[in-house]
Amino acid sequence: MSSFLFDILPVDTDVKLTIQLACLLNEEGHEVYYTDSSDSAFTFYLLQKGIGRVLYPGDFRWFKPDLVLLDRRLENRIGFYRNRNIRIIYLGLWFGDKQNVSKDFPLLFLAPSPLDYQDQSDGWLVCAGPLLDIGNISEKVLSKREELLAGRMSRYKKQNSKLSLFIVTEMTENINIGFHFYELVKDFCLQYPQYEIIVCSNSKDWLNRLFPLPVNMQFYLSDTSRRLTASGDLLVTNGDLDMLVSCIYHSLPVLLLPVTKVQAENTARMVYHGLGLQMDCKCGTVDDFRNQIQTLLQNKDDITAKMNRMSELFNRKSKQVHYVISWLEELVNRKERMI
């Protein structure tokens, strides 16, 4: 049997993307590990399955896996592995590519899976609504608030069929860019009261400068707002992969405002496949925002159909993981170095 090491960034979707493969390799009798830099909400689940952790770089004084499955964004570690004569293959997200595995280039594509894992913890949610003094906001409130908010949004949609609800979530930590965007959203709410805006953010920095909020704009402090995505008609986000995969599985049109290079790459994929639109969050206007929203809502049926097809493709690819296992076993048995 062989030993495999997953060395990936600690992002929920990236780790989740590999769990099915890691568990099946483990069930086949192979040794499977993750680096400590792969830590995420799923670590406890992995430990329960008998999948261990390796400290980078200290544990490599005694540990030498047969194959490292390396996040492409960790290219700076290639030299480290080469110096130790450890074989490498890159990991990537399958997003409608023509083939799942390329034998000509050391790159393995994996598809997202809709599976939920037992250790996924509920996030915290703090309401900072339009009538709530920011000075009285408690630090943490049990995520029961998320369930209540999702129920409220569902009832609101039924009672007010002409109003379009959507969520604005996890904007950039850059104060200036973030404040410009949230101020734009506030102005939008004031000009178009027929829209109900639910803002979820992981930072309080915007709140002091935004209060008082319009009656049709609510601000929630949330570490994880993915459970709410299915409750809205449209999502506005900055392009983090975990959120985008959630949108695809919930068939939720998305307006993307990328800030980082990785977010821009994710955004380009979504726009290319017709799953969303892009807007510049640094210099966009209220009219730009409204036009993009209207375009998405007008094309919602078409976008929903495309997302349904994409999620079906994800599911079919994830079910073919046993072919990936055979391919990895063949690679390990080869003598030549891959990178």
Image (spheres, rainbow, N blue to C red):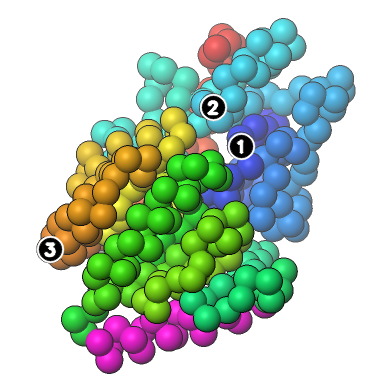
Whether residue 283 appears in this view of the structure is yes
What residue is shown with label 3?
298
Q: Is residue 27 left or right of residue 301?
A: right
Q: Position of residue 221 (x, y in %)?
A: 58, 65
- Mark 1 or mark 3: whose residue is earlier in sequence: 1
Mark 1 and mark 3: Cα distance apart in space: 37 Å
- Mark 1 or mark 2: whose residue is earlier in sequence: 1
Image: 312 above or below 100: below
Placement of the C terminus among the 4 image quadrants: top right
How busy is the neighbourhood of tag 1: few (under 14 within 10 Å), some, or many (20 plus)?
A: many
Q: Position of residue 200 (x, y in %)?
A: 49, 64
What residue is shown with label 1?
9
**Residue mark closest to the camera, 1 vs 3:** 3
Q: In which quarter of the image is residue 89?
A: top right
Mark 1 and mark 2: Cα distance apart in space: 8 Å
Residue type at mark 1? Answer: Leu
Residue extent of the magenta highlight: 142-160
What residue is shown with label 2?
73
Which residue appears at 79% of the width and 24% of the height?
57
Whether residue 111 appears in this view of the structure is no
Residue type at mark 3? Answer: Gln
Local secondary structure at mark 1: loop
Which residue appears at 47% of the width and 50% of the height?
179
Local secondary structure at mark 3: helix
Placement of the N terminus among the 4 image quadrants: top right
Which residue appears at 30% of the width and 55% of the height?
254
Residue nearest the viewer, comparing 111 with 216 = 216
Q: Position of residue 231 (x, y in %)?
A: 38, 75
How busy is the neighbourhood of tag 2: few (under 14 within 10 Å), some, or many (20 plus)?
A: few
